[in-house]
Image (cartoon, rainbow, N blue to C red):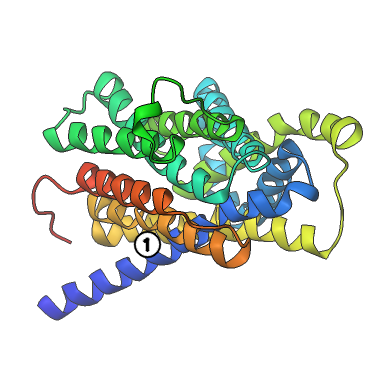
Amino acid sequence: MKNQFNKQYQIGALLAITASFIWSGNFIVSRYAINLAGPASLAFMRWIIATIFMLPFAYKNLKNEWPLFKANKAYFFWMGLIGFSVYNTLIYTAGHFTTAINMALIGSVIHPIVATVLAAIFVNEKLHWKNIAGIVLGLFGIVFLITKGQMTSITNFRFSTGDLWMVAAGICFGTYNVFVRKKPVGISSNSFLFVLFAIGAILLLPFSIYESIYVQPVVYNLHFLYVVLYLGIGNSTISYFFWNNAIHKLGASKTALFGTLIPLLSSIEAVWLLNEKFTNFQLISGLIIISGIVINTWPSKKING
């Protein structure tokens, strides 16, 4: 029994680490692709490819569950808008104005803070001392990052444009993470994701067309193809599949701990792939932020398997 549990834990941990690794590249791609496509166009291509790739896995359930989707169309509209269309467009907009390291660190702390507060308000989750401690550490880490370690200048500091976009993205994703728990009963995970992918793409279509004609034309080359395939298949479908299976094997609380790897992996990738410099204040703020996330997501009691 113990060996079986250890094997299950090892598989779950591997799935969660792999998903975190794939997701960490989203911030890198948002910086790499700034000359290939505008934010709305990039987000649209991500979700349209994810929709096509997900269709074979969702089709069978979708036919049976379609009445449930129709009955909850307002819920799916807002979830698709906030959690997919707006969230990713904000990330790809931020990529034009700030570093991938800043994006990873800010994004990693804003959404759990928002999710914790909104969960206490809307889904009656109790705030534990560790949640408050995690929020305080996370906010302190962000202030340390934005002020570049000069805490005495806190009264005069201003968010950069990219950092503000990233804060807005974190608010959107935190909101999505709370209300995804209100997924209508009877809808499978595959069809749920397929419909949200599709709504995300449909809502972005007019903005993508306008942007590609009047703001920033899409550069259709092999680099762009690699980027959208990575975003649409790896970052949107495979990673969700791995993460959901990790939750099944480890439980939600234990799996959430592996999400703390995302800002660390993104920072390493930014230095390696984008030649960004990892400064001392980013290192310190990163350690503070990751500590806050670990405290916030650490299980309050032991969870078996």
Looking at the rendered structure, the kind of residue marked 1 is: Ala
Quadrant where the image shows the C terminus: bottom left
Q: Is residue 81 left or right of residue 19?
A: right
Quadrant where the image shows the N terminus: bottom left
Q: Is residue 214 left or right of residue 267?
A: right
Whether residue 1 is visible here, answered yes or no, is no
Q: Is residue 46 above or below residue 88?
A: below
Whether residue 140 is visible here, answered yes or no, is yes
Residue placed at 87% from the left, 55% from the top? 220
Residue 91 position within the rendered picture, expressed as x and y whole percent measured from the top left: 59, 39
Residue 229 position within the rendered picture, expressed as x and y whole percent measured from the top left: 69, 60
Q: Is residue 147 left or right of residue 51?
A: left
Residue 184 position within the rendered picture, expressed as x and y whole percent measured from the top left: 40, 32
Residue placed at 27% from the left, 33% from the top? 135
Residue 146 position within the rendered picture, expressed as x and y whole percent measured from the top left: 45, 35
Depth check: give the residue in front, 46 or 39. Answer: 39
Depth check: give the residue in front, 89 or 94. Answer: 94
Depth check: give the residue in front, 111 or 121. Answer: 111
Q: Which residue is mark 1?
A: 16
Q: Is residue 198 above or below residue 5?
A: above
- Circle 1 SS class: helix
